[in-house]
Image (tube, rainbow, N blue to C red):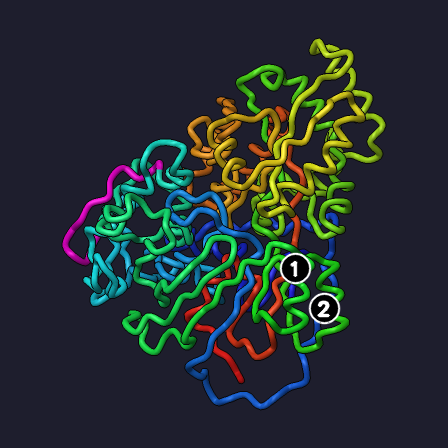
């Protein structure tokens, strides 16, 4: 069951993850974490009761096919470069570590164990006998330390194409010790290290495949060490992944195949759930969940606090956004309560840069920290009047014209809030013309900085550093707004270089409050949705971030 978008029991990836990660990294126990904040809006409906109990086999059964409804077309397939949801490589690949589904702590995946020699040196020992898929050009060869060195070097490549290179800025070197051991040497203590290594995008890939396909942008280049083998995939339609008979975890996966079906239209996706045409479906909105409850008692649902914050990005190095008065005017114009209700059907938490539903210990408490701030306070009359004055003082007494980029890719974050914002900005004299872009053009526009205003869902999972360092630090690999502030840089650098979770939380909160005051970006809310599954789908928790992690363990009771 979930409360305020935070899971309890199996699948909770929140506070426990960072607490345990800190314990693993530090030689002494961390200070107690701050109390979890209360979500200001969007309380999830009561959890749906399960259907009447049925006889369950003594253990998991092998075999069967599952149909997984994708809420969007990934569009990009390279795990090291994509800026969105990942499907094929999550079924076909592995990271060095993973987040344990029950405890949320980093545990070994391709790594069997690791040693922390001191605060700056870690040695990771690989599982022996792990093999890449028996597909050309690797043909089932063994995974070894050279593959780790290559993969880490590739995902740390410079340039906007590799959006997560900042994950490992504090890693000085990565060296092969022998075929089954790799040494990471840090330039300074680095609190997020183990959690970052467990992130789904940090896949280990074979150089031969990258060379053969000149990258990993083709679906058929999904050749990793994972539980499922690539069979077929058609863009905007879907495809099939089949069981890897040589998977390194004995007896897994249980399923014969996973069939991926792209269903971007919500009404169609809801209908597919009701009529049992799909077995698992993500991003079901609150209204859809309620209707499924009424008509489909054999469908179960988990609340998923979306691990992204909807936000407005501005090119702060260009006029007029380089003027803090203009940026503050936008922040004042935004009615976040209206966005929660109008764009997200009331299913959202008002937040700062770090979403409170996912990372409560580092997020801003609405009642204590946000409720009375300019832009967050209610009613909006004072904010609107101050916004008009700021624009006039900045040389725009009659307002200004601009564009606001949006897309249907993950519309819950990247289009619906933007549509509500158009009306809100008009109230202060900012005439924002909607610029609706196809997904690839939208992502290219963001990465190249070719936008006036762009509404974006930007997120992570349980590591606050990803939410805020990548987007606000002057060297951040996703700082597409070109924001620079020495004070925020210092706060984020200090938060990265300590293993004390309480101190990290304090610094992240201070950095967020300064970012809001400086209108570095305009933070809106964190929505939540539902993940549904047919009752015969066992060992699956839809509230878990990137729930495809679990498919190797999923089995069917039918």
Query: Does the stretch in magenta take in 217?
Result: no
Residues packed near mark 2 inside 10 Å, few (<14), some (14 to 19) or many (20 plus): many
Q: Which residue is mark 1?
A: 284
What's the magenta region?
A: 169-182
Give the percent coordinates (x, y) of residue 534.
60, 74
Vertical position of residue 19 compared to residue 184: above or below: below
Q: Which residue is mark 2?
A: 292
Under circle 1, the secondary element is strand
Give the percent coordinates (x, y) of residue 296.
71, 74
Main SS of the magenta part reads strand
Q: Dividing the picture into quarters, in which one does residue 475 lie?
A: top left
Vertical position of residue 214 compared to residue 484: above or below: below
Looking at the image, which is closer to me, 319 or 472?
Answer: 319
Give the percent coordinates (x, y) of residue 141.
19, 62
Query: Does the stretch in magenta take in 177?
Result: yes
Give the percent coordinates (x, y) of residue 344.
72, 49
Answer yes or no: is residue 18 visible.
Answer: no
Real-space CA distance between mark 2 and mark 1, rounded to the nearest whole angstrom: 10 Å
The residue sitting at 59% across, 26% down in the picture is 314
Under circle 2, the secondary element is helix
Q: Quadrant of the N terminus?
A: bottom right
The residue sitting at 77% across, 47% down in the picture is 341
Vertical position of residue 9 compared to residue 395: above or below: below
- Is 105 on the left-hand or right-hand side of 538? left
- Is 150 on the left-hand or right-hand side of 485? left
Mark toward the start of the polypeptide (2 vs 1)? 1
The residue sitting at 74% across, 29% down in the picture is 374
| Residue 358 numbered tag | none
Looking at the image, which is closer to me, 516 or 478?
Answer: 478
Asked if labels 1 and 2 touch by Cβ distance under 8 angstroms, the answer is yes
Residues packed near mark 1 inside 10 Å, few (<14), some (14 to 19) or many (20 plus): many
The residue sitting at 69% across, 27% down in the picture is 433
């Amino acid at each position: 069951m979930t409360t305020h978008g935070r899971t309890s029991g199996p699948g909770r990836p929140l506070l426990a993850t960072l607490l345990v990660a800190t314990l693993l990294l530090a030689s002494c126990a961390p200070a107690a974490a701050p109390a979890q904040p209360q979500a200001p809006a969007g309380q999830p409906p009561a959890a749906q009761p399960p259907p009447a109990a049925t006889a369950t086999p003594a253990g998991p059964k092998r075999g069967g096919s599952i149909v997984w409804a994708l809420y969007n077309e990934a569009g990009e397939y390279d795990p090291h470069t994509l800026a969105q949801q990942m499907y094929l490589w999550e079924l076909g690949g592995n990271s060095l570590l993973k987040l344990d589904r029950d405890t949320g702590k980093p545990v070994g995946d391709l790594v069997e164990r690791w040693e922390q020699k001191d605060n700056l040196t870690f040695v990771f020992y690989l599982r022996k006998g792990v093999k890449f898929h028996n597909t050309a050009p690797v043909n089932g060869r063994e995974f070894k330390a050279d593959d780790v060195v290559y993969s880490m070097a590739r995902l740390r490549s410079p340039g906007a194409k590799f959006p997560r290179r900042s994950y490992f800025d504090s890693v000085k070197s990565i060296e092969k010790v022998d075929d089954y051991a790799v040494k990471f040497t840090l330039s300074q203590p680095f609190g997020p290290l183990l959690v970052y290594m467990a992130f789904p995008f940090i896949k280990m890939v074979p150089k031969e495949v990258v060379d053969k396909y000149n990258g990993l942008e083709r679906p058929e280049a999904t050749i990793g060490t994972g539980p499922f083998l690539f069979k077929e995939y058609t863009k905007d339609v879907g495809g099939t992944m089949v069981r890897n008979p040589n998977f390194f975890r004995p007896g897994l996966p249980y399923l014969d195949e996973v069939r991926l079906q792209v269903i971007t239209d919500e009404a169609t996706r809801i209908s597919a759930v009701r009529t049992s045409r799909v077995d698992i479906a993500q991003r079901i909105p609150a209204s859809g969940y309620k209707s499924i409850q009424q008509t489909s008692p054999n469908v179960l649902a988990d609340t998923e606090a979306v691990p992204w914050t909807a936000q407005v990005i501005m090119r702060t190095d260009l006029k007029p956004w380089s003027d803090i008065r203009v940026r503050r005017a936008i922040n004042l114009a935004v009615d976040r309560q209206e966005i929660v209700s109008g764009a997200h059907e009331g299913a959202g938490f008002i937040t700062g840069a770090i979403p409170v539903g996912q990372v409560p210990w580092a997020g801003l408490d609405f009642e204590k920290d946000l409720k009375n701030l300019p832009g967050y306070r209610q009613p909006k009359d004072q904010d609107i009047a101050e916004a008009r004055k700021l624009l006039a003082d900045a040389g725009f007494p009659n307002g200004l014209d601009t564009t606001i980029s949006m897309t249907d890719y993950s519309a819950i974050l990247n289009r619906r809030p933007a549509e509500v914002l158009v009306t809100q900005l008009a109230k202060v004299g900012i005439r924002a013309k909607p610029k609706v872009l196809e997904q690839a053009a939208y992502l290219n526009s963001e990465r190249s900085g070719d936008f006036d205003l762009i509404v974006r869902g930007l997120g992570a999972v349980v590591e606050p550093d990803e939410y805020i360092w990548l987007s606000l630090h002057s060297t951040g690999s996703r700082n597409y707004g070109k924001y620079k502030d020495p004070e925020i840089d210092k706060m984020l650098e200090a938060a990265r270089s300590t293993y004390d979770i309480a101190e990290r939380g304090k610094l992240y909160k201070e950095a967020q409050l300064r970012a809001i005051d400086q209108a570095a970006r305009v933070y809106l809310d964190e929505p939540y949705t539902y993940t549904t599954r047919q009752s015969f789908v066992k060992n699956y928790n839809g509230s878990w971030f990137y729930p495809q992690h679990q498919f190797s363990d999923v089995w069917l009771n039918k």
